[in-house]
Amino acid sequence: MPTDVVIRCEHVDRTFETDDGREHAVLQDIELDVRTGEFLVLIGSSGCGKSTLLNIMAGFDKPSSGSVSVLGRPIAGPGPDRAMVFQDYALLPWLDAMHNVEIGLRLQGHPRNERMQTAREVLELVGLGHAMDRPVYKLSGGMQQRVSIARALALKPAVLLMDEPFGALDAFQRGTMHRELQRIWKSTGSSIVFVTHSLEEALVLGTRVVAMSPGHRGMRGEVVLDPEGTRDPLSAAFTELKHELFALVSADTPAASAFLE
Amino acid sequence: MTNARRRSRLLPNAALSVIGPLAFIALWWVAAASSLFPSAVLPAPPAVVAALYEWAFGNPVNGPYSGSLGVAIAASTQRVLVGYLIAAVLGVLIGIPAGYFRVFGRIIDPLIQLLRPIPVTAWVPLSLVFFGFGFKGAIFLVALGSFFPIVVNTIEGVRGANRMLVRVGRMLGANQFQLLTLFILPASLPAIFVGLRVGIGLAWVLVIVAELLSVKSGIGYTLIDAYGVNRYDVVISAMILLGVMGFLSDRIVVAIGSILLRWHREMSIHAD
């Protein structure tokens, strides 16, 4: 296996059983490599399997068949090498920001000094150096999501998995978080898998955007972006990419294809 | 505006809350002064206050109801404390895995549902047979009575805890024990404290049941003993004392809860 692959999905199928006992395939024969240092975005409408694929990478779900490995080792369950940032933050409300961030290191038996040091560093990285001792429930949604990102970064994961992390934020907060996440990604060199249903979010953030759609039980195609290129949503180039991506995401929904033809 | 409204209501609120008790005492006083009840059966408030004072500070040579209050309180409180702590530890220790592990829950649930409807007082004969007339029997009844609300609320709390926390814990690398103690237990504490509060009330009910029926000391024993010799001033003194003890222990549980659950209280305020 080439060393520049963080997560490798081979022939991944995921089938759910419906209430009336029929089998419903959400993912079929998925082949996907997450490359070291890339910002990979999975995009698609609801039901396209993007979150299922992310949960499989996280180890919260298992493929019905096929294999998924992280740094060459098969995934047996969730673990700190694949840190997840959840849409609803999922912080521990009885702890302050600092302890929410250091608890992962505590569970792995790191000494106290080192934990506090790391927690301070990542909180400063996400711009929360001033709020370390604040109870997390007193923070705004955007700040809570920063804590959640800091918690994930503190684990020094091989890959950061983000499940529509900014879905609950308003447009202004989301814009700020996009810039912040870009900055963090560039300064840490992390590999990121980011799930969204927003075309604009995908194209603003990603270096590679994989389009998924329900009818295809998985991937439809991908758009590769220049990491250093402009991400101005008002530029003509951006609009063109958006059209291309929209076509990929919605090609198999009858109404959309009629519209595009 | 809100401040002014709050201040203007503060005084009337305090005044409102003493109307009930004062009216009750007045009614009691009138009834005692009337010829409806002989004063030996329904003593007036001053007579009860005198009996309470004698029970607390009188010279023990004057009889069993003089200067023995402290001993009675200590005896009852000790039984409540030991029985209640056993119930709290067992209730949480059984409730958490019963709420978390589906198989263990399936096993333990029917047992709890089957035993819980049996009034704890119905256990008295068996308790006497197995634990005798002393300390152990009283502890058994107290522990059994407060166990059920604690275990039931703990199970509910664990089942209601955000399932996302389990994912977070596993992602952060928690083992099963850490998952239960560092994630599930704190998340369930609000519900556990509901059970602990119901439990402390029942603990006092059951310590009195035990003392009325078998144990030969404590506030409940003084109450039934005084009834036997028609000392209704002491009976009512014991009732008042039980009310105070129940109230104080409830306050203690609430105070501990409000320290541990500050996040929960403030979080619900913030959600508004």
Image (cartoon, coloured by chain):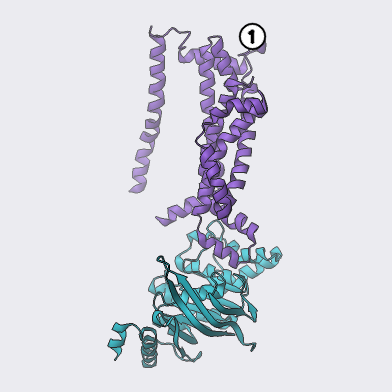
Chain colours: A cyan, B purple
Q: Quadrant of the N terminus of chain A?
A: bottom right
Q: Secondary structure at mark 1?
A: helix
Asked if residue B245 shows in the view, the reply is no
- Residue B158 % position (x, y): 53, 52
- Residue B224 % position (x, y): 56, 17
- Residue A195 % position (x, y): 47, 77
Q: Residue at x 39, y 90 (%)?
A: A241
Asked if residue A253 shows in the view, the reply is yes
Check the residue under mark 1 and report the chain it is in. B
- Residue A114 % position (x, y): 69, 68
Q: Quadrant of the C terminus of chain A?
A: bottom left
- Is residue B175 toward the left or the right of residue B35 in the image? right
For residue A103, what is the image quadrant? bottom right
For residue A188, what is the image quadrant? bottom right
Q: Amino acid at mark 1?
A: Asn
Q: Nearer the viewer, residue B212 or B267?
A: B212
- Is residue B270 toward the left or the right of residue B52 in the image? left
Sort mark 1 into few (<14), some (14-19) or many (20+) by Cα contacts within 10 Å.
few
Q: Residue at x 49, y 92 (%)?
A: A226
Q: Residue furthest right?
A: A111
Q: Nearer the viewer, residue B56 or B114?
A: B114
Please determine whether, in this image, residue B74 is positioned above or below residue B27.
below
Which residue corresponds to mark 1? Answer: B62
Please determine whether, in this image, residue B57 is positioned above or below residue A36.
above
- How many numbered circles does the render carry? 1
